[in-house]
Amino acid sequence: MTTHPPLPTLRPLLDPSPEYAKWRAEEPIRRVTVWGDNSPWLVTRHEDARAVLADPRFSADSTRDGFPGFRPQSPPRAPGQFFMMDPPDHTRLRRVLIPDFTFRRIERLRPAIARICGELLDAMTGEADAVAGAGTATTSPVTQADLVEAYALPLPSLVICELLGVPYEDHDFFQRQARSFSSLASGPEEMLAARKALHTYLGELLARRTREPADDLISRLARDRVATGEVSAPEAVGIASLLLVAGHETTANMFPLAVVALLRHPGQLAALRADPGLWPAAVEELLRHLTVAHSGLRRMATEDVEVAGVRIRAGEGVIVAVQAANRDSSAFADPDTLDVRRDTTGHLAFGHGLHQCIGQSLARAELQVGLPALFDRLPGLRLIAPPENSALTMSTIHGVRSLPVSW
């Protein structure tokens, strides 16, 4: 039996695994092993990645036999998990979220995001306590913190809780469940228990919002979708679970890596300080450069398809390595260099095609507001420990467990 190299699971903190550059140059579509004898095709070039992700002959349906999932065993797909479905179910379920994730609606969230950033920075620096205790003796100001715990994780968690209508005081609970979903070390029983706990929680919240609606997404799901029969209650719970987990985890992981990247490229940070109008382009470049969803987008061919001269047969799996495609010199000049002035049009950090991330406008808004707020408030921000020491391993989303900083 032919053996194929394993799909890389470890990487440098700010770059893709080095194997990807070698394979992209030598054999841009090649076989790799993910587990057991499951050896899907790996796509590493930007042009080929876009072609696969836009082609309806490549299925995202994770229930297909031999689908190249992240683990040899995973719990059955839950209702409402439309990112692992094909049309028409994918179209039906994704459509119910479009009104809540339009660019215009997300833009209206920016003042709330800015408020949350300010409150978190007040708490992190001790200024909130100083203001609350005005007229009384105060302790020395806080000059260091774990940026993940104090800012990067609570920011998107608070935002997605506000959008969904989930009480933020329960964030420790849903963050624990999210870690079980994203860890490659989690077995099927652990994942199933985490999903059951989260779905029970959200099912009770959906029932409560059915009786007592509020101005939030879960209430709109209950009133406009479940009550009309457009989606079932289990599907609504699955949609809410997907948003709650994905809506905080990827941005929470992206944030500290973006901070490290800018601190290690002081010229780029200086350019942003000199011209804050560069921040939207800088966020796109950081998304391209870091690509935290580094386990690839998984597909399966439903019929024979030729991609760049390689015949992929029906029933064969494909992994689109977006982190490799985002470093392809045929798409981006000098791709391994961080350049906040770069034109990043076409980057694949949010995927491509009909499964492109529905929450991308929200992630952009959080990063475009949250990063400049941090660097403006703490101009002397610096790292006080090597972030490589806390890099996440065995995770589908790249990041760090903690990021000690001072200012």
Image: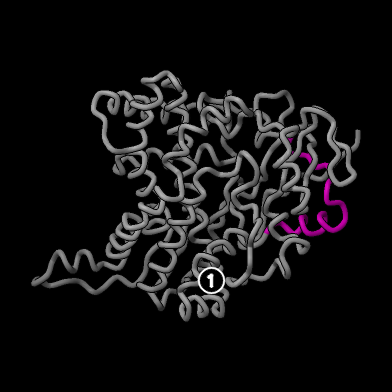
Q: How many marks?
A: 1
Residue 256 in the image: x percent, y percent? Answer: 49, 61
Q: Is residue 34 magenta?
A: yes
Q: Residue at x 69, y 57 (%)?
A: 326
Q: Tell me the SS state at disc 1.
A: helix
Q: Is residue 52 magenta?
A: no
Residue sitting nearer the eye, 32 or 193? 32
When asked about the image quadrant of residue 376, the answer is bottom left
Q: Residue at x 73, y 70 (%)?
A: 334
The residue to which callout 1 is attached is 262
Image quarter (top left, top right, bottom left or bottom right) of the C terminus: bottom left
Crowding around mark 1 (Cα neighbors within 10 Å: few <14, some 14 to 19, many 20+) is many
**Residues shaded magenta:** 16-35
Residue 393 in the image: x percent, y percent? Answer: 60, 50
Image quarter (top left, top right, bottom left or bottom right) of the N terminus: top right
Q: Amino acid at mark 1?
A: Leu
Q: Residue at x 33, y 44 (%)?
A: 162
